[in-house]
Image (tube, rainbow, N blue to C red):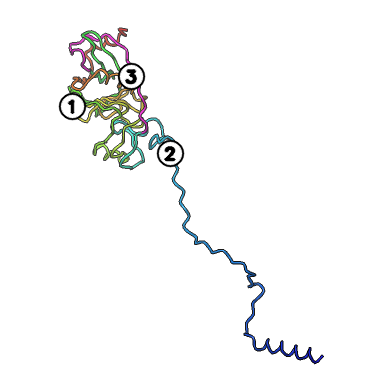
């Protein structure tokens, strides 16, 4: 009994002299080392989706793309440069041959503004006849020019005065299926006028442009295969009555 008393006194003495702190049960680690916390970085931005096929700035818009060749309709876009879309192969589409008594010489081009046809002279009696669109009221013109250059899928640079009239027009639009100049342009002398294709086939046969001569892409491709640089182009207000009657009469095959 005496030994037990001595042992209890010794334990009590140790407890009194021990450092005055204790470990709370919930703070005990039992040898477990917590993993280091990772620094929370800025979330990675998802890359922007790549446009399907990359077919142009207005893939979902109507075929005419909101533009005329010279500026009839404007777009709400104010971008300085726009893509014209893809550049597919365009097959040449030959128009009918018609009777066309003339003295212009084979290889000449005659534009009948009133009749809205372009004639490529084959001989003194025949010509190819293409349907065209011409300048709207106040923009039609007449005169003689020569083809100064030919450009497939031309870029479009609306002049400053056009952009002033239509602020939505771009400064530059690359060539392509959405470009209002179409698949081919035949530039006339040093003027701003061209014989060119179109992205709006419904305009053919109308007076819609600001002076340029529009053709379907197939027709202008065919014409460009015949008419080279230096070809003379006669832009007439209308054909002489006799020539117009004969040309209207029918095909030569």
**Residue at left 31%, top 23%?**
215
Q: Quadrant of residue 217?
A: top left
- Gap in angstroms between the C-alphas marked 3 and 2: 31 Å
Disc 2 crowd rating (10 Å Cα; few below 14, some 14-19, many 20+) is few
Q: Quadrant of residue 165?
A: top left
Q: Residue 220 versus residue 54: which sits nearer the camera? A: 54
Q: Quadrant of residue 14?
A: bottom right
> Height in image: 116 above or below 169?
above
Q: Are marks 3 and 2 in contact (CB under 8 Å)?
A: no
Q: How many marks?
A: 3
The kind of secondary structure the magenta stretch mainly shows is loop
**Residue at left 23%, top 13%?**
121
Q: Quadrant of the C terminus?
A: top left
Q: Are marks 1 and 2 in contact (CB under 8 Å)?
A: no
From the viewer's perspective, tell me whether residue 73 is left or right of residue 194. right
Of discs 1 and 3, which sits in the foreground? 3
> Height in image: 66 above or below 248?
below
**Residue identified by numbered label 3:** 92
Residue 236: x, y in percent?
Answer: 21, 19
* First along the sequence among labels 3 and 2: 2
**Residue identified by numbered label 2:** 51
* Residue 189 - label: 1
- Gap in angstroms between the C-alphas marked 1 and 3: 24 Å
Question: Which residues make up the magenta segment?
Answer: 85-109
* Residue 78 - label: none
Disc 1 crowd rating (10 Å Cα; few below 14, some 14-19, many 20+) is some
Of discs 1 and 2, which sits in the foreground? 2
Q: Residue 184 versus residue 141: which sits nearer the camera? A: 184
Residue 93: x, y in percent?
Answer: 34, 17
């Amino acid at each position: 009994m005496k030994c037990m008393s001595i042992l209890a006194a010794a334990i009590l003495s140790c407890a009194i002299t021990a450092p005055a702190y204790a470990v709370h049960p919930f703070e005990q680690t039992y040898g477990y080392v917590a993993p280091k916390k990772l620094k929370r970085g800025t979330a990675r931005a998802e890359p922007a989706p790549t446009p399907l096929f990359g077919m142009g700035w207005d893939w979902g818009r109507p075929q005419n793309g909101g533009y005329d060749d010279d500026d009839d309709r404007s777009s709400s876009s104010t971008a300085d440069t726009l893509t014209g879309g893809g550049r597919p192969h365009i097959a040449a589409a030959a128009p009918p041959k018609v009777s066309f008594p003339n003295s212009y010489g084979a290889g000449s081009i005659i534009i009948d503004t009133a009749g809205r046809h372009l004639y490529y002279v084959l001989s003194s009696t025949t010509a190819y006849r293409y349907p065209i669109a011409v300048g709207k009221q106040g923009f039609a013109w007449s005169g003689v020019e020569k083809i100064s250059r030919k450009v497939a899928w031309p870029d479009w640079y609306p002049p400053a005065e056009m952009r002033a009239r239509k602020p939505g027009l771009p400064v530059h639009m690359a060539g392509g299926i959405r470009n209002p100049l179409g698949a081919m342009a035949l530039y006339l002398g040093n003027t701003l006028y061209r014989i060119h294709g179109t992205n709006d086939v419904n305009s053919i046969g109308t007076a819609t442009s600001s002076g340029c001569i529009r053709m379907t892409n197939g027709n202008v491709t065919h014409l460009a295969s015949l008419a080279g640089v230096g070809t003379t182009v006669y832009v007439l207000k209308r054909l002489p009555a006799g020539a117009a009657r004969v040309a209207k009469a029918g095909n030569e095959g």
